[in-house]
Structures are given as C-alpha cells and as structure tokens.
C-alpha cells in the first residue's frame, strides 16, 4: 500500500483505500465466487477478472521481471514501482484515488491466490 498510497497522495488523492477492510473482505471471500472480484464502480470495471489475468499473463510477467532482477524479494518492489508509474501516467484519465482503490482491490486478493489453492497457471 505504501507505494500505491504514496503516489496517489502525491498526485492529489484525498481518500485512500481502507486496506484493513479490503484484507478482511478478502479473507471472508476466499473460496467463494466473489473472491478476487474488485468492488469498484461499474464504469471502472475490468474487462477480465484479475484471477484470469494472472493466469493468462503470469508467464510473460515473470519473464519480464526476471530480466530486471533475479531476486524474488525484489519482485514486489519492481511491480510497485511499475504501478506507481501507471497511476501517474493515467492521472488525467482516472482519479488517483480510484486508481489506488482498483490496484488494492485487485492486489490484496491476488496475493492470496497461491495459499488459497486457487492459482492454476498452465
């Protein structure tokens, strides 16, 4: 949340997502059909479910990440910096407060995929 919240605030976000509430909601939805579905306004809905996006793009993303670092502990930092850049680049199209909510509504449940047994990458 630090990298996402930091850039959102820097860009003028007045409200940040409630990370505690998102974590609690994620925990309650593990194993049911609502798991991983971001709770965002209809006009900002993703075209694909985040779980499907992870399944589809994970191999490509890992390939790109490992071109920049071989250390798995650095993967989240690299992804966070990339997300910061995307939020900044899109600030004139999507309010940074909304961008931060979209990111966290997706990132928190996706971080639980492997431990929930829901991650199936071919």
Image (cartoon, rainbow, N blue to C red):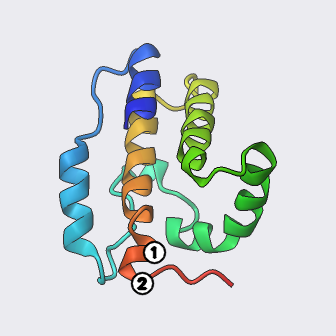
Q: Which residue is drawn at 33% across and 56% down?
A: 39
- The image quadrant where one finds the C terminus is bottom right
Please tell me which residue lies in front, 73 or 58: 73
Name the mark on residue 14. Answer: none
Residue 32 lies left or right of residue 61; in this view the side is left
Residue 27 lies left or right of residue 65; in this view the side is left
Q: Position of residue 101 (x, y in %)?
A: 37, 42
Q: Residues within 10 Å of mark 2 (few under 14, many from 20)?
A: few
Please tell me which residue lies in front, 2 or 74: 74
Please tell me which residue lies in front, 12 or 104: 104
Q: What element carries label 2?
A: loop
Name the mark on residue 117. Answer: 2
Q: What element carries label 1?
A: helix
Residue placed furthest toward the front: 71
**13 to 69, vertically: above or below:** above
Name the mark on residue 114. Answer: 1
Tell me the quarter of the picture where residue 114 sits. Answer: bottom left
Q: Where is residue 71 in the image (x, y as percent from the top left)?
A: 65, 50
């Amino acid at each position: 949340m630090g990298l996402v919240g930091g850039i959102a605030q820097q860009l003028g976000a007045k409200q940040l997502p409630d990370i505690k509430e998102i974590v609690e909601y994620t925990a309650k939805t593990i194993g049911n059909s609502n798991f991983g579905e971001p709770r965002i306004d209809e006009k900002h809905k993703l075209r694909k479910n985040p779980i499907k996006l992870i399944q589809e793009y994970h191999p490509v993303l890992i390939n790109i990440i490992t071109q920049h670092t071989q250390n798995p502990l650095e993967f989240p930092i690299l992804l966070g910096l990339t997300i910061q850049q995307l939020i900044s680049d899109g600030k004139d199209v999507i309010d940074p407060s909304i961008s931060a909510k979209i990111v966290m509504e997706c990132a928190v449940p996706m971080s639980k995929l492997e431990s929930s047994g829901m991650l199936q990458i071919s």
